[in-house]
Image (tube, helix red, strand yellow):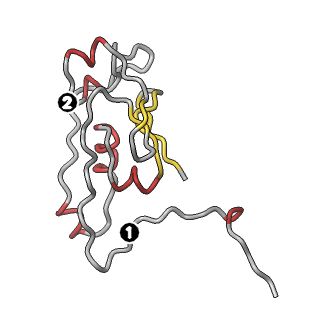
Amino acid sequence: DRLLVMYLGQVVESGPTQALWERPSHPYTRLLLAASPVADPRLRQARPEALLRGELPNPLAPPSGCAFRTRCAHATPRCASETPGLRELSDGRQLACHFDLPPVAAPPLPANVIPFQPTPSVHATAYKFG
């Protein structure tokens, strides 16, 4: 299974679901995952606050270069002048960013928490009868 992350209609990161979930590379993917609700208060307190700056750009007139640059903490003048292409990373992911930001590891889970596991669809499950 693969996960695809888009911002203003452009793919910013894609890759195997588990790898992307555990080690997001693109700043927008990181912010999305950091903003997802956490039911366990112990995990909620251990997680850094997701901070997204700036205003959401007009999707009908996106900014030049990287569409996420107006909200990205890592943006440089290059981000305004060049649109980053989707490039292959060594672990099977694809990333649209000018920079080689190291993937951020998810904080360790307490021993009693079951990590995310993609659920296979009913059609992909083999059943044995008799």
Location of residue 52 with respect to 130 vertically, above or below: above
Position of residue 57 measured from the top left corner of the image (x, y, whole percent): 34, 22
Position of residue 95 measured from the top left corner of the image (x, y, whole percent): 39, 35
Position of residue 62 measured from the top left corner of the image (x, y, whole percent): 38, 17
What amino acid is labelled 1 in the image? Answer: Pro
The count of marks equals 2
Q: Residue at x 33, y 47 (%)?
A: 24
Is residue 85 or residue 112 the one in the foreground?
A: 85
Location of residue 18 with respect to 117 vertically, above or below: above
Q: Residue at x 40, y 53 (%)?
A: 19
What amino acid is labelled 2 in the image? Answer: His
The residue beneath circle 1 is 115
Q: Would you call the spot at circle 1 few (<14 residues within 10 Å), some (14-19), or many (20 or more)? A: few
Quarter of the image where the C terminus is located: bottom right
Location of residue 97 with respect to 90 vertically, above or below: above
Q: Is residue 126 left or right of residue 16?
A: right
Is residue 24 or residue 35 the one in the foreground?
A: 24
Q: Secondary structure at mark 2?
A: loop
